[in-house]
Amino acid sequence: MTTFAGPAPTEFIELDERWSTHNYHPLPVVITEAEGAWVTDVTGRRYLDFLSAYSALNFGHRHPELVAAAVTQLGRVTLTSRAFHHDVLGRFCAELAQLTGTEMVLPMNTGAEAVESALKVARKWAYEVKGVPAGQAEIVVAGSNFHGRTISIVSFSTDETARTGFGPYTPGFVVVKYGDAAALADAITERTAAVLLEPIQGEAGVIVPPDGYLAEARRLCDEAGVLLIADEIQSGLARTGTLLALDHERVRADLYTLGKALGGGIVPLSAVVGRRDVLGVLNPGEHGSTFGGNPLACAVGRAVIRLLSTGEYQRRSASLGAHLHARLGELVGHGLAEVRGRGLWAGIDIAPGGLSGRAASEELAGRGVLCKETHGATLRIAPPLTISQEDLDQGIDAIAAVVRRPATS
Ligand SMILES: *Cc1c(COP(=O)(O)O)cnc(C)c1O
């Protein structure tokens, strides 16, 4: 059983249960404050954040430079709509393109919107540039993908919980096994507009594809004149020890979707970045978003880019990640069946006979560490990249204690 230091914060949980839809099943922790890698609940109990809002909090909670950028912009202008220019958008886009080595930026808000936008751009590019007959473009995606929750995106999900009950589904998607280059080669036809992949599948349990898979995907796309779209919403922006997870393979995508950490944990901010001749297919009126590229989000985004341009967070993720993986690796055969991941990002499978993922995350919360199960007996570990080695070790100690426990005790 999980033991909490203070009284269970049941009033807040009951309000949520009564008035908010039940599309999540949160741990029974009610957070009221946070700083860095730590959050405090309404009873005053502190927890280490080992989830970082699925990598949206790569820089920790309330990073002072990010908060300062937001506060400054709140004192100027927060929203103009794209009916007018404002003085932050262009600088944000230029700096993001320079950081990522790309040519053009389409700013949006949430990750799912960035993915939807990339799919729309890829289809339009296929008709206008590649010459695919109208209405026939196909986009190849991977099994066990996670790209968001819109109707079109869940149309090509292989997760029945995410998909069932939401049809009719959007056509034009072909699903192949992740990590299988031969299956990808077979799926590409002259009607293929794009291949959409996560360089590491986060939601699926931090699945790293076999060596050479992403390079082979790049080669197949080049050979067939197909766009490679990398969804780096969770894997990008220093999470794996490099700016983009594709950098490990020295592979470049034609389009990247970015989100989560781009908004510094303060505002929703996403973007599609990539080739000018591809993103250039969009003309006025063909796509948009009222809040996309708003001054407040762009100001926070610029501060995020400044943090990333130092390389400090990439280095921290690489070095602390090596430590994390070395320590988790020692638990394989001692409570863990497998450890996967890169940088300060790990998917760990609790060995058969141990706790379920849900029970383990409840136990960890009881020991002051917050993380979340993905499927079955898999936990996803993603502390803020700002975490100290001491705090990281404290969290790993708790994980070691929990995963060693048999399910029956
Ligand atoms: C979280 C995520 C998304 C969706 O982002 P939202 O902001 O939740 O819409 C898309 N792709 C990947 C890889 C993600 O991790």
Image (spheres, grey):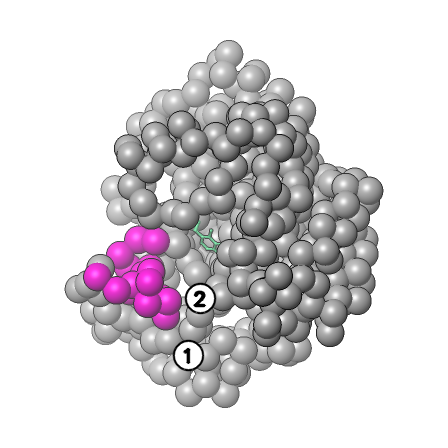
Q: Which structural element holds mark 2?
A: loop
Q: Which structural element holds mark 1?
A: strand
Q: Residue at x 58, y 29 (%)?
A: 6
Residue 349 found in image quarter: bottom right
Q: Residue at x 44, y 61 (%)?
A: 146
Q: Position of residue 2 (x, y in %)?
A: 57, 46
- Residue 110 drawn in magenta: no
Spatial CA span between label 1 and label 2:
10 Å
Q: Position of residue 237 (x, y in %)?
A: 62, 48
Disc 2 C-beta below 8 A from ligand 1: yes
Which quarter of the rendering shows the C terminus? bottom right
Q: Amino acid at mark 2?
A: Asn
**Residue at the spot of label 2:** 145
Whether residue 342 is situated above or below residue 182 in the rendered picture: above
The answer to whether residue 66 of the structure is visible from this angle is no
Out of 183 and 247, give the one closest to the viewer.
183
Q: Residues within 10 Å of mark 2 (few under 14, many from 20)?
A: many
The answer to whether residue 255 of the structure is visible from this angle is yes
Out of 353 and 385, give the one closest to the viewer.
353
Disc 1 C-beta below 8 A from ligand 1: no
Q: Position of residue 101 (x, y in %)?
A: 62, 52
| Extreme residue toward the left, this view | 168
The magenta-colored residue range is 149-165
**Residue at the spot of label 1:** 176
Q: Position of residue 139 (x, y in %)?
A: 35, 70
Q: Is residue 166 left or right of residue 339?
A: left
- Residue 160 drawn in magenta: yes
Q: Amino acid at mark 1?
A: Val
Q: Residues within 10 Å of mark 1 (few under 14, many from 20)?
A: some
